[in-house]
Structure formats: structure tokens, C-alpha cells
Amino acid sequence: MVKCVHITNLIQKSRIASSVSVADQRSMVHLTRFFFTGNTRTPSRRTTGVLSRLKQHPSKMAANGSSTASKSSNNAGGKPTGPTAEQVVGNFQRMRQEQRGMASKASEFEMENNEHSLVIETLKEVDPSRKCFRLVGGVLVERTVKEVLPALENNKEQITKIIETLSSQMQTKGRELTEYREKYNIRLVGEGEGEGQSADSRDSEGGASKGGTGVLVS
């Protein structure tokens, strides 16, 4: 009976160790039943092997379980790392590309707006009943001046609004780029070489810069 109690204590201690397999736990339960039922048969080799390991290394198995739990807690409580230099440069290049796309679109609409202004000024000096042709979807359609002129003026107003919207978006994107450059100390190649050298000498004398590691972008 004392032996059965001893085996039960070993099983309870071993359950806190994560290194004990499910098969070993089943063998330990079988071993407990084996002695409690008063079975006189010889236990199997697996059952006796589990018992010998419990006798020799109960504290070691518990220590392994505690060390595993401490490692998991340390990993969970770690501080998140910041973006890498490649990620900083990639985000900066993406923002620059978006700004360039806005500028390209704004330039196209400016040219179209100028063409509308030129045509409107020309049609105002023409007889309203005179025939004119307008290109609609790649097809020339015959209209009169009084029919075409209001449509052109409406289109010009819409294009002007689009240009104003793009200009506002470009200004916002420019401020975001400036803040992003200041945050990560990004410098463009060939930009302010003399100022950069003097600033680098001042930083080397006074210590590291407040923006962290600088990033050079071509």
C-alpha cells in the first residue's frame, strides 16, 4: 500500500513537467492500477521504465517544465522591434511614387484644361448656329456651336475641380513625406552635401543624432 502511495505521488509530480509524453502518463496510470489491484504479475518493460525514470529524475522533469514556461513568458513579454532599414526605404519610395503619380495626373488635367479654354474662347466669337464637330468616344459628332459650348464649359469646371483636389492631395502627401523623412532621418543622394558633412561632424562631436540611424535614398 505504501508503494502504491509512493507511485501516486510520483505521478502527480510528473504531471507538471511538459516533457512527459501521453504514452508515459498512460503507463503510469496503468502502473498505479497494477499495484492497487494487488496484481502479482510482473509489470511490462515500458511500465518499469517509466517508474525508474520517475525515481531518478522527478526534479529534473519539473525543472524542464518550469524553464519552458519561463521561456514562453519571456517571449510573450518582449518589446516589439521597429521597422528595418529596408522597410523604411520601401515605404518612403512608395510614398514618393504616389506623389509623382498625383503630379503626373495633375499635369495631364492642366493640359486638358488649357485646351478647353482655348476652344471655348474660339467658339465664343463664332455664330451660335454654325455647325461644329465634337469628338465623342472616338467618333466625330455633328453639332452646333450653341450645343457644344455649354458642354465644354461644364467639362472645364469639372476639370478645374479635379485639379484642385489633386493639388490638395499632393500637399498632404508632401507633408507626410517630410514628417517621414524627419522621423527616420532619411537623406536623398546629392541633397545638401555640404550641409550634410557639417551636420555629420557636429553629430560626431556631440553624440548620436536624435533621429536614429540615417537612411540614404537614391
Image (spheres, rainbow, N blue to C red):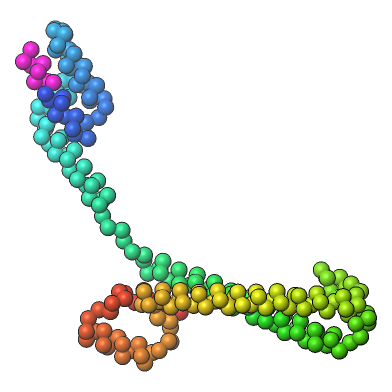
Relative vertical location of residue 64 with respect to residue 39 in this rendering, above or below: below
Where residue 104 sits: x, y (%)? 62, 77
Q: Which secondary structure is most common in the magenta stretch? A: helix
Where residue 25 sits, quadrant-wise, is top left
Q: Quadrant of residue 33?
A: top left
150 left or right of 131?
left
Assess whether residue 157 is covered by the magenta stretch.
no
Q: Position of residue 56 (x, y in %)?
A: 9, 30
Q: Which quarter of the rendering shows the N terminus?
A: top left
* Residue positioned most to the left: 2
- The image shows a total of numbered marks equal to 0
Magenta residue span: 1-8
**Residue pictured at 45% horizontal, 68% vertical:** 91
Residue 142: x, y in percent? 91, 74
Q: Is residue 40 visible?
A: yes
Residue lying furthest bottom in this view? Answer: 194
158 in relation to 29, above or below: below
Seen at 16% across and 8% down, the residue is 37
Which quarter shows the C terminus? bottom left
Q: In front here: 13 or 126? A: 126
Residue at image point 76% right, 75% down: 154
Q: Nearer the viewer, residue 24 or 67?
A: 67
Q: Residue at x 85, y 76 (%)?
A: 148
Quarter of the image holding residue 131? bottom right
Q: Is residue 42 above or below residue 108?
A: above
Q: In this rendering, does residue 96 appear at all?
A: no
Relative vertical location of residue 41 with respect to residue 161 in this rendering, above or below: above
* Side of 115 relative to 90 (left or right): right
Where residue 89 appears, as percent x and y from the top left, is 43, 71
